[in-house]
Image (cartoon, rainbow, N blue to C red):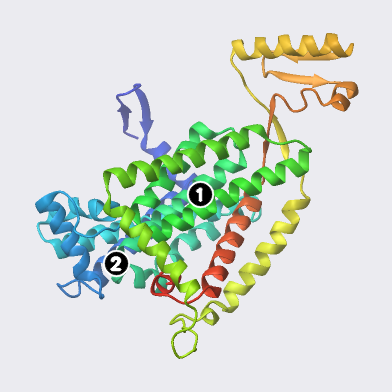
Amino acid sequence: MTSFTIFKNDNPISKIRIIQYFKNNYWLLMLFAIFTFSFVLDIFVLTRYSLSYGIDGAFYDIQVRNILQHGFPMSNDPPLAYYLLTPFVLLFGNSFLGIKIGMALMGSLMVLPAYLLTECYTKEKVGGSKIPALLSAFMVTVNVNYFALIGDFLQNLVGVLFLVVFLYFAVMWFADINQWKKYGALTVLFLCLNLLTHIYTGAVAVTIFFSLLIFSIVFKTYKIRKLPLFDLKILGMVSALVLAFFTVLFLTYPVMYTKFSTVMLSFISSSTTQTGVTGRGVTSPVSGIIFLSLPYMLGIVAAVIILYRGLKEKITLMPVRMDKTTAKRDKTKLEMVKTTLGLDKATLEMGNATIKMDNTLHDNNKILYKNFHSKMNKNTLLVWAYISMAVLLAVLVSIPASDYQSRFLL
């Protein structure tokens, strides 16, 4: 069998090994097939007519054309989606066609985070089967809500894509908060991308993030009977980053302040003017009853059951790896505590920087869990995010009606 070489490390790879690799990882081919099918289907649906679809179709065309002519969009909306669509317009030379192809590509990309999120939940529940995750990846881009977004609410769809990716990285990070370099940076990045894409998906992302972080802090405090200081630092740092992000955004792009303030004032004013001159309440054009579907209610019940089971589980304590300087400093502190308390049994393993303390040290609570971080169950975090979104939906349904409230719900 003919073989070829990867020039980077001169590692010969035969065709047999390639075939065997894809046999062992068949899901990669199936996931790519689902992505391709979704992209082709989107192109077919969107290009049946030459003009843009929906009441906002021409709106996106105007924004992209204004970027090409002046460098910035005409509206005061978060502009990232418009800038992402601009290269497709340049590439295909037609604003209508370029926007449609760009949206088909970004919409089809949702199969990847949908697969990863579902696989994250089902990995240990179905014997390692990839079928539920692949089914989720397929369903996310062939449902009626998806086609409603890709045909009319284009900016919302880009925001949903970033929101799902953000949710995956957030769950992976909070499951092991020490992985801030790997997942933490990506979580914060996609949080900012959400804020730059759409005000509604950005608000949902901020809500989910702080909901997960606060839940993680409370849960760990309850389980280990000690405040997780690292988590509290993350809370303070990210809060400062979000505040700094908004400050820089409003200073460099002032029209964004107008957009955010308009939406906030709309919610506030609707709560203070619940009744009109005639004394009748304002009726919301979107009824909360439409969300009381059987799948949605079953999802809420299942989430509550999974959360209840997760709350009874013990969190995993993992030793923290430190450099030599940090390990030497902690060893000195340990020796000082050992001398002060008169302890005889205390060992420090330099390899993993693990401190083993006897009962006296635990009782005195001097350096309890000093060199440990805790890991949480991903499923518990996932269902908490689901419940948080359900609570957000309930709040939106219950508040007084307004134009922005209805658009947020949709």
Secondary structure of residue under mark 1: helix
Q: Is residue 344 left or right of residue 29?
A: right
Tell me the distance, in whole angstroms, between the alpha carbons under discs 1 and 2.
24 Å
Q: Is residue 89 left or right of residue 269?
A: left
CB atoms of marks 1 and 2 within 8 Å:
no
Secondary structure of residue under mark 2: helix
* Classed neighbour count for the residue bearing mark 1: other residues with Cα under 10 Å, few (<14), some (14–19), many (≥20): many
Q: Amino acid at mark 1?
A: Tyr
Can residue 183 be seen from the camera position used here? no
Q: Which residue is mark 2?
A: 42
Task: Identify the image quadrant of residue 323.
Answer: top right
Residue at (72% x, 20% y) in the render: 354
Q: Residue 311: x, y in percent?
A: 74, 52
User: Viewer-proximal residue, 238 or 110?
Assistant: 238
Q: Residue 298: x, y in percent?
A: 64, 72
Q: Which mark is residue 168?
A: 1
Q: Amino acid at mark 2?
A: Asp
Residue at (56% x, 79% y) in the render: 293
**Mark 2 or mark 1, which is nearer the start of the sequence?**
2
User: Viewer-proximal residue, 374 or 93?
Assistant: 374
Q: Nearer the viewer, mark 1 or mark 2?
A: 1
Please count the marks in the image: 2
Quarter the C terminus occupies? bottom left
39 in relation to 402, above or below: above
Can residue 200 be seen from the camera position used here? yes
268 in relation to 277, above or below: above
Name of the residue lying farthest toward the bottom: 278
Task: Identify the image quadrant of residue 158.
Answer: bottom left
